[in-house]
């Protein structure tokens, strides 16, 4: 394959990641309206918002079979369009039960699309010859910021959320379909056996998935509880408390966009270990802080430290075992389970003790990145991407 085709594929998969993120960011801005429209209590809304994570966890193991049957390009196009189209459904739900059902379906589409596009990202990375996975996940973060910015504008202008979500669904379906034209049309070898219809995570994916689990736990805890921490522990105003999540999310996005250069210089293992140390320092700062500024700085360090972990876990999974999409599905299932349990675990520990104690657990898990990063070494040493070796190459082109 020629270099222009590979560069085109890289731009295409980056656009797919951006669309996927934009769907998430758009929906997040309309959650308050859905809560009020259906007259849901906080507990009822919390139960409904568990449905996407459950749907993702259940559906991700199915993705390997779909990718094998349809090929990468077709599978990604189908799933990203289904994910975007499903954005219109939650605002149409008449009650809690239907809302939970639509979010379950929405989450299933999201999880399978996530697996398929990461598998495509690994294929492009192998042909590109440089680390690109961190940058791809950075584009996902850019998509969430863009989707949420449009959602805030729509809410400020008083647009009907049902019209807003339906219009965004149509736009993002079109954008996803166009982006997929440039993807690699990877198809299985004729002799390659199809994976099971419902593939449990292969053993090789479990250790990698546990590293991702630690990072996503810290991400979920910080995303859901940073504002509460600032309000309750640091006695900050509502505006300052909101800034804690902004600092966390922005630092994570910036770190992912620049993370490929770090990985090329340090290698995957050293990058994750260094990130784990940074994240642990941020956790210690959060636990020790009783004022807003150091607490916000701690959350920012957490965002920087965990930014490249999940992209590198997917890259390592894609280069382990004989079926990249199945391995990625296994890592995603283990990793994203953390996002399901983290917010509730932090709340239970905080209720029994305090929020600083809860974030002491987060700090301990970030140390797991330091001691467990070695499981990424086989991918770095034996994969087809020379950029994961320390000290190689300059930055990747556009």
Image (spheres, rainbow, N blue to C red):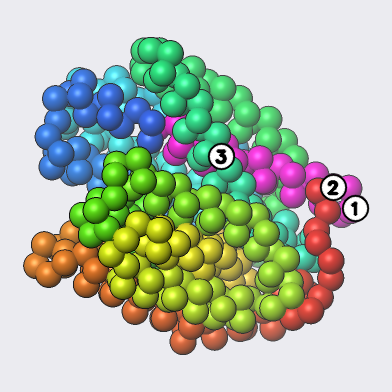
Can you identify the residue that label 2 sits on? Answer: 5
Which residue position is annotated with label 1?
2
- The numbered mark, 2 or 3, whose residue comes first in the sequence reads 2
Image check: 379 left or right of 222?
Answer: right
Q: Nearer the viewer, residue 48 or 266?
A: 266
> Is residue 336 located in the magenta-colored stretch of the structure?
no
Q: Main secondary structure of the magenta part?
A: helix
Query: Which quadrant is the N terminus positioned in?
Result: bottom right
Q: Residue at x 15, y 39 (%)?
A: 42
- 202 vs 172: above or below: below
* Residue at x 73%, y 66% (from the top left corner): 261
Q: Is residue 205 left or right of residue 186?
A: left
Residue 364: percent from the left, percent from the top?
Answer: 34, 79
The residue depicted at 63 percent of the width and 71 percent of the height is 319
Give the tally of numbered discs: 3
Q: Position of residue 92 (x, y in %)?
A: 29, 20
C-alpha separation, residue under disc 1 versus residue under disc 2: 5 Å
At which x and y percent is residue 287? 30, 71
- What secondary structure is marked by label 1? loop
Q: Quadrant of residue 290?
A: bottom left
Residue 123: mark in rendering: none
Residue located beneath label 3 in the image? 143
- 266, above or below 94, in the image: below
Place of residue 270 in the rendered image (x, y in percent of width and height, measured from the top left): 61, 81
User: Which of disc 1 and disc 3 is earlier in sequence?
Assistant: 1
Range of magenta residues:
1-27
Q: Contact, CB < 8 Å: mark 1 with mark 2? A: yes
Q: Secondary structure at mark 3?
A: helix
């Amino acid at each position: 394959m020629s270099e222009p085709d590979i560069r085109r594929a890289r731009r295409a998969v980056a656009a797919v990641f951006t669309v996927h993120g934009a769907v998430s960011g758009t929906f997040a801005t309309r959650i308050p309206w859905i809560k009020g429209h259906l007259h849901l209590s906080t507990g009822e809304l919390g139960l409904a918002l568990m449905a996407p994570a459950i749907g993702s966890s259940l559906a991700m193991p199915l993705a390997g079979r779909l990718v094998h049957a349809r090929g990468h390009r077709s599978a990604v196009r189908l799933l990203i369009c289904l994910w975007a189209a499903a954005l219109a459904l939650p605002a149409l739900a008449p009650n809690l039960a239907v809302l939970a059902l639509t979010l379950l379906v929405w989450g299933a589409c999201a999880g399978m699309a996530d697996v398929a596009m990461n598998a495509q990202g690994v294929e492009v990375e192998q042909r590109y010859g440089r680390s690109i996975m961190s940058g791809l996940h950075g584009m996902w973060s850019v998509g969430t910021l863009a989707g949420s910015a449009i959602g805030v504008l729509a809410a400020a202008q008083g647009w009907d959320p049902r019209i807003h979500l339906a219009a965004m669904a149509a736009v993002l379906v079109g954008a996803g379909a166009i982006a997929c034209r440039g993807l690699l049309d990877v198809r299985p070898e004729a002799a390659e056996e199809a994976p099971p219809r419902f593939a449990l995570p292969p053993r090789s994916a479990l250790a990698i998935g546990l590293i991702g689990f630690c990072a996503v736990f810290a991400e979920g805890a910080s995303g859901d509880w940073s504002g509460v921490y600032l309000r309750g522990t640091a006695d900050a105003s509502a505006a300052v408390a909101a800034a804690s999540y902004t600092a966390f999310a922005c630092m994570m996005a910036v770190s992912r966009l620049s993370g490929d250069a770090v990985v090329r210089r340090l290698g995957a293992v050293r990058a994750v270990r260094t990130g784990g140390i940074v994240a642990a320092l941020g956790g210690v700062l959060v636990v020790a802080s009783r004022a807003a500024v150091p607490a916000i700085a701690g959350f920012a360090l957490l965002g920087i430290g965990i930014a490249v972990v999940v992209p590198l876990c997917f890259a390592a999974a894609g280069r382990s075992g004989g079926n990249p999409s199945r391995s990625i599905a296994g890592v995603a299932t283990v990793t994203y389970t953390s996002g399901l349990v983290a917010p509730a675990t932090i709340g239970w520990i905080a209720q029994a003790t305090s929020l600083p104690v809860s974030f002491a657990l987060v700090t301990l898990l970030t140390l797991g990145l330091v001691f467990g990063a070695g499981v990424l070494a086989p991918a770095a040493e034996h994969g087809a991407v020379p950029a994961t070796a320390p000290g190689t190459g300059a930055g990747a082109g556009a």
